Image (cartoon, rainbow, N blue to C red):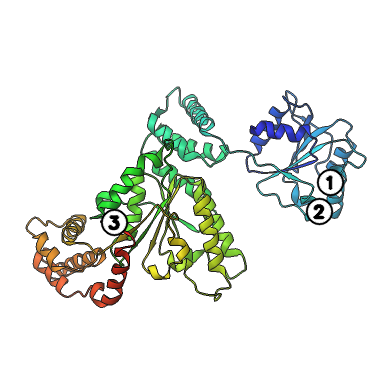
């Protein structure tokens, strides 16, 4: 059934109390006006500032009723004609015993007509006595056709306000814009579309990153997600050949509608040696899929009060789903899930349980990228086949990859490396991670600056010689991790 049919059925059944949680009051009024085409009732709206107004006529007519809550309920109770009463932000007045009692009598049809009362607000909390009598109705979010119509309407408004100047609209950018506005109510989607249109009188590919940022700022009310503005391109990541190919093969399916029999990709787990580029790879996945990147910091979720940690996780994941399509990056996931016994009161087990359920049942296009350093601390349930599409291991870079890493970091810092032997630098840095190679380049730049001379290959070799990489300092642990991953994971390179 459609949204309108569902609502008409509730009215036709004379449902005494309906609760609608939404900030879009205008849409609620419009929905009920359309309901009157299927089942006729007198339609009224009430607010504490305007009082009661009849809104099913060609024009709104004020009723001679003072705006206070008790007087309003008396007027509804005494009304002989059946009506629909939209009460905006009425629920705070239910804290008074008289108001609550009177509402219950209307709902229970005590000496009054079969009226339909609708409590409307951004968040409506009812006393337990009324909650059992209420039916909650959730307006459906606009689909892509409704969003496309809204964008075109806003473009027409812009043209009228600017002397007929038409909005320049790139067809592909508009399609992407509409896809990214999914998950918003019409009011919020209109606000973002208007912002982008009025910014420069055009909608193009350059507007999409701004759209993602505006949508994130609107929806991330919990504050547990971080929007990563600088998503790396795969060209900025040395090596990781298999991972790059894997993502590229799935990009089109993730971005559009999956063909029959082919499910959209859901996520990957990146394990590896510290400093070898797992975080950079996570950012590059978002760049490769051409969607925004959100980072979930498990440290901000934990709260000392019972149930709050799980609530925080639910809110963060719900926000991510509203921001879909996107990549959700859970960095160092083992720190949020690895806990033995009941030392934390079972919080980690409950968090893990909810996360696993969400991973299995989510329908939205949220691609999960989890990164971990300590694989032995990960719960076995998370590593079971099917939790992730694939588990990749990011190993220490080989000689060719190390040479590429040197090139990337030297070019990034505008160093002319034409006279350098990248092969010699790669051979000298055997066992180094990407992060350690970067610090060698940084150290050589500082040494050159202190000596007031350009960076040379000799300075780089000196920095390499003075560095003890993690593969040497923690040789046993690094080798144990590599041995564990050799038969259990897919090499990212």
Say whether residue 198 is visible. no
On the rendered image, what quadrant is the C terminus found in? bottom left
Q: Which of pointers 3 and 1 lies earlier in the amino acid sequence?
A: 1
Circle 1 sits in a helix, a strand or a loop, which is it? helix
Q: Residue at x 48, y 45 (%)?
A: 215
* First of labels 1, 2 by sequence position: 1
Residue 160 seen anywhere in this rendered image of the structure: yes
Q: Are marks 1 and 2 in contact (CB under 8 Å)?
A: no
Which numbered circle lies on residue 103? 1
Q: Which mark is residue 492?
A: 3
- Would you say 97 lies left or right of 278 here? right
| Gap between marks 1 and 2 measured at Cα | 11 Å
- Residue 413 lies, in percent from the top left, at 20, 58
Residue labelled with disc 2:
129
Question: Extreme front residue here?
Answer: 487
Place residue 82 in its image quadrant.
top right
């Amino acid at each position: 059934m459609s949204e309108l049919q569902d609502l008409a059925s509730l009215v036709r059944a004379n449902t005494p109390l309906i609760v609608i949680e939404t900030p879009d009051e205008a849409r609620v009024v419009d929905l009920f006006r359309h309901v009157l085409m299927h089942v006729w009732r007198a339609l009224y709206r009430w607010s504490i500032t305007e009082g009661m107004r009849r809104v099913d006529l060609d024009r709104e007519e004020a009723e001679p009723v003072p705006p206070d809550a008790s007087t309003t309920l008396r007027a509804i109770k005494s009304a002989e004609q059946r009506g629909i009463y939209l009460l905006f932000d009425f629920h705070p007045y239910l804290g008074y015993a008289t108001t609550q009692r009177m509402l219950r009598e209307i709902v229970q049809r005590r000496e009054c007509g079969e009226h339909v009362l609708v409590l409307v607000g951004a968040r409506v909390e009812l006393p337990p006595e009324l909650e059992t009598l209420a039916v909650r109705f959730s307006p459906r979010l606009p689909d892509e056709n409704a969003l496309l119509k809204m964008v075109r309407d806003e473009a027409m408004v812009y043209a009228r306000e600017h002397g007929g100047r038409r909005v320049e609209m790139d067809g592909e950018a508009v399609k992407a814009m509409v896809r990214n506005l999914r998950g918003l109510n019409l009011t919020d989607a209109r606000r973002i579309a208007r912002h982008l249109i009025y910014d420069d009188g055009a909608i193009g590919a350059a507007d999409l990153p701004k759209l993602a940022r505006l949508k994130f700022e609107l929806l991330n009310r919990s504050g547990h997600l971080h929007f990563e503005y600088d998503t790396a391109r795969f060209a900025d990541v040395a090596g990781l050949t298999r991972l790059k190919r894997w993502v590229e093969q799935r990009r089109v399916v993730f971005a559009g509608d999956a063909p029959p029999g082919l499910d959209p990709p859901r996520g990957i787990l990146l394990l590896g040696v510290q400093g070898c580029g797992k975080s950079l790879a996570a950012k590059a996945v978002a760049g490769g899929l051409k969607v925004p990147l959100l980072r979930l910091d498990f440290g901000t979720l934990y709260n000392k009060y019972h149930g709050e940690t799980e609530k925080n996780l639910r809110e963060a994941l719900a926000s991510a789903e509203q921001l879909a399509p996107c990549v959700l990056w859970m960095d160092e996931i083992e720190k949020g899930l690895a806990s033995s016994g009941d030392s934390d009161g079972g919080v980690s087990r409950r968090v893990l349980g909810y996360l696993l359920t969400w991973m299995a049942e989510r329908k939205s296009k949220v691609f999960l990228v989890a990164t971990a350093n300590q694989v032995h601390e990960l719960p076995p349930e998370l590593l079971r086949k099917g939790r992730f599409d694939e588990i990749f291991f990011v190993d220490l870079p080989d000689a060719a990859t190390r040479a590429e890493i040197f090139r990337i970091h030297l070019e990034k810092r505008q160093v002319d490396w034409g006279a350098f032997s990248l092969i010699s630098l790669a051979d000298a840095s055997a066992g180094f991670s990407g992060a350690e190679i970067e610090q060698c380049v940084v150290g050589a730049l500082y040494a050159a600056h202190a000596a007031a001379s350009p960076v040379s290959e000799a300075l780089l070799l000196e920095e390499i010689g003075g560095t003890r990489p993690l593969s040497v300092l923690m040789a046993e642990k690094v080798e144990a991790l590599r041995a564990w991953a050799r038969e259990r994971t897919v090499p990212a390179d």
